[in-house]
């Protein structure tokens, strides 16, 4: 994960917390008040406290085969929230796609 965060130029003054198992992730969901959100949350960013939580289990075992369920996308999406300083999902996702397309260009070089 660290290389990905560095590659996408994540801010240095940011804390990334990886929940190592689903029990730890459940505690984070309770802590961030998202326990009752439907669907599978892969990450969560606290813009005020500069902390991003990542669901470790899903990094190792993506729930789906889609691009959106891969760890690169999760990191890029959370970085979208961070870099744009927004809790808006559409804006975060737009930034994520920008970061990910930059990654593809970098790989092709
Ligand atoms: Zn989001």
Image (spheres, helix red, strand yellow):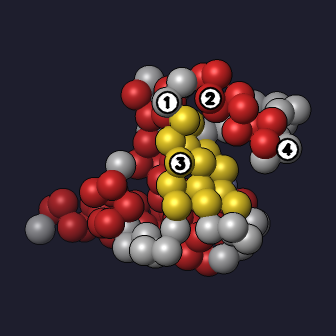
Residue at disc 1, secondary structure: loop
Q: Which residue is mark 4?
A: 33
Residue 80 visible to the viewer: yes
Q: Give the image location of residue 53, x and y in percent.
A: 59, 48
Residue under circle 2? 24
Q: Which residue is mark 1?
A: 20
Out of 56 and 97, give the one closest to the viewer: 56
Tag of residue 17: 3
Q: In this orientation, does residue 40 appear?
A: no
Mark 3–mark 1 Cα distance, whole angstroms, equals 9 Å
| Cα–Cα span, label 2 and label 4 | 14 Å
The local crowd at label 1, few if under 14, some if 14 to 19, many if 20 or more residues have their Cα within 10 Å, is some
Q: Position of residue 102 (x, y in %)?
A: 33, 69
Does mark 1's beta carbon lie closer than 8 Å to ligand 1? no
> Could you tell me which residue is drawn at 73 percent across and 71 percent down?
48
Q: Residues within 10 Å of mark 2 (few under 14, many from 20)?
A: some
Are the residues at dot 2 and dot 1 in contact (C-beta closer than 8 Å)?
yes
Disc nearer the start of the sequence (2/4): 2
Q: Secondary structure at mark 2?
A: helix
Taking depth in this image into account, of 20 and 72 the one nearest to the observer is: 20
Q: Say if 104 sits above or below 11 in the image.
A: above
Q: Is mark 3 within 8 Å of ligand 1?
A: no
Instruction: Mark 4 or mark 1: name the one nearer the start of the chain.
Output: 1
Percent coordinates x, y for residue 28 in the rendering = 70, 39
Front of the two marks 2 and 4? 2
Identify whether 94 is placed above or below 34. below
> Residue 82: x percent and y percent?
59, 70
SS under mark 4: loop
């Amino acid at each position: 994960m660290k290389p990905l965060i560095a590659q996408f130029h994540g801010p240095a003054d940011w804390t990334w917390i990886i929940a190592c198992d689903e029990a730890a992730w459940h505690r984070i969901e309770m802590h961030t008040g998202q326990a009752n959100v439907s669907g599978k949350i892969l990450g969560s960013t606290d813009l005020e406290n500069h902390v991003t939580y990542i669901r470790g289990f899903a990094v190792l075992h993506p729930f789906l085969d889609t691009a959106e369920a891969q760890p690169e996308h999760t990191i890029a999406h959370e970085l979208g929230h961070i870099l744009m300083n927004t809790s808006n999902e559409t804006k975060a996702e737009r930034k994520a796609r920008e970061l990910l397309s930059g990654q593809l260009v970098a790989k092709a070089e």
